[in-house]
Structure formats: structure tokens, C-alpha cells
Image (cartoon, helix red, strand yellow):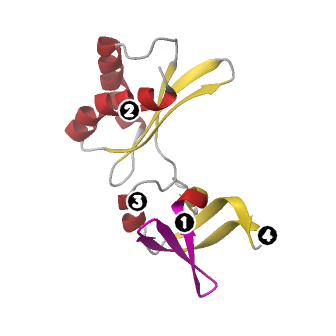
Amino acid sequence: MAKGNTEKIAKKLAMPIIEQLNFELVDIEYKKEGANWVLRYYIDKPGGISLDDCQIFSEKISEALDREDPIAQRYYLEVSSPGLDRPLKKESDFERFKGRNVELRLYRAINNRKKYIGELVGLQGNNIIIKVDNQMLEFNKKNVSIVRLVIEI
């Protein structure tokens, strides 16, 4: 089964559980790490996700995965918080974290730079807008490898 299909099926199985627990599904990864395949769910909730929350979700999604058995090869299941430097992926992420500092990385350099740090202004169509040194910069999403929150201490 293709990686993308596996992630779609994993998401479909997770959504009823996510809704039941009032969690947010931040991301799903299904990838090979060394010799092993890993199915990793990143979950969150207002106030942050706890180890107990990860445990509860892990037990419930494990039951659903065992029942449906959508993945042919052996894999490890991991459930994690997205972390303080969480990546922003969904439109709602860009709305929710407006005003926060973000690190934006590009696939290819613009003006000899691939990394920008600035205040998230928001998402406009397919463009991510950040403010760097009082200058508004726009980046097309297809040119951006990752946008993640900057950890502020």
C-alpha cells in the first residue's frame, strides 16, 4: 500500500477517536526509519497533551488498527505531542497562531536565504505571510518545506 494511502486510512480510523476525546489530530506520519516502518500520530488539545492522553489514544487507535488491519508490513505505532515547536500545516493552524513567531524554511533559497524567522501574519490563498524586520514577506506554500513555531522562553 502506498504511503499516502496508509496515512489516509490511518486518519480515517483516528478521527472518530479524536472527536470522542476532544483532541486535535495535528499530523500523521508513516515512514521508514532505519530498518523499521513507523506510524506516528501527533495529537494535541487546549492546554497541551499529557502522557496519559497519549496512552489513552494509543490504546484506542491500536484497537482500531488491529480490527481493520490496513497495513500489511510490520510497523511501530507511536503517539506524540507535536511539541512546542510544532509544525503548522492546516489552515486553522495559521489562523490560531497569528502573531506568534515562526521559522519558515524554503526548498530553494530566495536572495541566498532558505530560512526566515518572523511574526506570522497569516495565510492568504496559497501564500504564507510573515513579518520580518517590519517588512511583510509572502511565500507560496509550494515553495515552503516547513513552517514551525519558534520556542519562546
Where is residue 97 drawn, in percent x and y?
42, 66
Q: CA distance from mark 4 to mark 2?
A: 36 Å
Q: CA distance from mark 3 to mark 1?
A: 16 Å
Image height check: is 47 above or below 100? above
Badge 1 or badge 4: first in the primary sequence: 4
Of the pair 94 and 126, the residue shown nearer to us: 126
**Amino acid at the residue labelled 2:** Lys
Q: Which residue is mark 2?
A: 8
Q: CA distance from mark 2 to mark 3?
A: 20 Å
Which quadrant would residue 15 be assigned to in this image?
A: top left
Q: Which residue is mark 1?
A: 140
Q: CA distance from mark 1 to mark 4?
A: 17 Å
Image height check: is 43 above or below 127? above
The answer, for residue 54, to whether it is visible in the render is yes
Q: Which residue is mark 4?
A: 112
How many residues crowd around disc 2 within 10 Å: few (fewer than 14), some, or many (20 or more)?
Answer: few
Q: CA distance from mark 4 to mark 3?
A: 28 Å
How many residues crowd around disc 1 within 10 Å: few (fewer than 14), some, or many (20 or more)?
Answer: some
Q: Which residue is mark 3?
A: 93
Name the residue at 49% across, 69% down: 127
Q: Are marks 2 and 3 in contact (CB under 8 Å)?
A: no
- Residue 65 located within the stretch drawn in magenta: no
Q: Residue 65 shows which numbered tag?
A: none
**Amino acid at the residue labelled 3:** Asp
Of the pair 131 and 111, the residue shown nearer to us: 111
Badge 4 or badge 2: first in the primary sequence: 2
Badge 1 or badge 2: first in the primary sequence: 2
Where is residue 88 drawn, in percent x and y?
48, 56
